[in-house]
Amino acid sequence: MKRVLLFSSIFLAGASPFSAQTLQSFTDGAVSGEVSFTHGTNTGHSIIALAPNGIMAFAGPTPIDSRYDFGMLAVESQWIDSFGKTWDEFYFTTKGNLRVLYAGRNITDGISGFGVMGSLWIDGTQTGRRNTANSPTVAIYDNQSTFASISVKNMNSKSKGAQLILGSGFSDSTGWSLQHDPDVNGTQAFAILNRSSYTFPFQMDNGGRISLGFTGRHTATKAVEFAQPKQVREGLNIYSKYKTSDLGRTNVSASVDSDFTVTLDPGIWRVSADLFFTVGGGTPGFWAYFDVNGGSVNRGWSRWTFPDSTGGSSVKTYTFRVIGNNTGAYQSIGPATGSGGYFVKGEALVTVTSATSLQLVWGQWSPQGQTTTLLAPSCLVATRVD
């Protein structure tokens, strides 16, 4: 601290005689430094430079920042570049005229810039160095007519792109990163990476195709591709249940099928059912309807379309103003010989006021005694429409 104070006092004492083309040296023991003030050939062009640990070789109306091989802090004003632009500059330059810190304003065009050649660290952890609560540590303001931008570019052609890390340090697996070219440099791919699990919930490839919900890198074959389509449909309030194997019933009346049960939240829902079935023999009736269990439902309407002859050559439609076991649609149908099965289609529109369980009920209607088999891929789909 003593040396700093001594240097400051000498600087202040020696500053008054400075004039154009002035160079003054300061020495404190084995440490030497110089302050130089000079002007260039441009009108109003001047430079004041401080070399804290170096001796400058000259003074005069010549640019001084390219002439020395030690660290130097300089303020340059009214410099006119080769394009005729006038600049004011502040910079710290090291050996080879490497400006590790630079700030300047193009007075002609009314634009300015600031550069750090190397890493820029912004550390707000020290006591008394924090910003106010809930304020951004870094804020970018601009009045461009389009947008303000931040770019992260890797200039190494052999690199694997660039990433912006959110929520953690470089060595910490917590948080997320936004990555360009996460696999191979030049693939023009973009991804959001979960750094903890190393999964890629969002990806976009060179063709603009988007992949969602994948654990590893994936290239979509469609405009948007989902890793878990069923969960996506349910997220959009589209619930579906499908038969993946055949289910046969013998000598049974219509009963709830647990495979065809969905829970509906309050709202307006459209429900549809596509049922494929066979009849083993005789002429039992096939019975199907929609029902609800629990909750509160303002029952809308339902409609069923059945084949009404052996072989399914013609159909019959049943329409009801409500849903439930009083809306059972049935038809006596003979064995499905030669046709491979029958097709029944049901539709309903219901308003749910509190969560309820909607069920598809199906089975035989008297006369019973034969085997009725529901075939895959029979399905039930409920879609919220409000």
Image (cartoon, grey):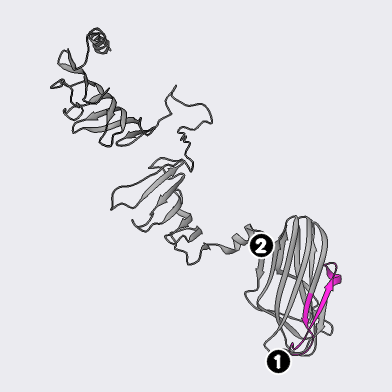
| Viewer-closest of 119 and 251 | 119
**Is mark 2 in CB contact (under 8 Å) with mark 1?**
no
Give the residue displayed 39% in from the left and 57% down from the top.
188
Give the percent coordinates (x, y) of residue 337: 70, 92
Give the residue displayed 39% in from the left and 44% down from the top.
151
User: Does 109 appear above or below 17?
Assistant: below
Q: Is residue 27 left or right of residue 324?
A: left
Residue at mark 1: 337
- The amino acid type of the residue labelled 1 equals Thr
Find numbered disc 2 in the image and state the secondary structure of the residue it sits on: strand
User: Does 178 appear above or below 124?
Assistant: below
Per the rendered image, the range of residues in magenta is 304-328
| Viewer-closest of 182 and 82 | 82
User: Does 89 appear above or below 258?
Assistant: above
Counting residues from the start of the chain, the first of labels 2 and 1 encountered is 2
Q: CA distance from mark 2 to mark 1?
A: 35 Å
Q: Is residue 142 left or right of residue 82?
A: right
Reply yes or no: does residue 301 show up in magenta: no
Reply yes or no: does residue 315 show up in magenta: yes
Q: Is residue 187 left or right of residue 39?
A: right
| Viewer-closest of 25 and 146 | 146
Which circle marks residue 238 in the picture? 2
Find numbered disc 1 in the image and state the secondary structure of the residue it sits on: loop
Give the residue displayed 16% in from the left and 28% down from the top.
67
Q: Is residue 184 left or right of residue 168?
A: left
Which circle marks residue 289 in the picture? none
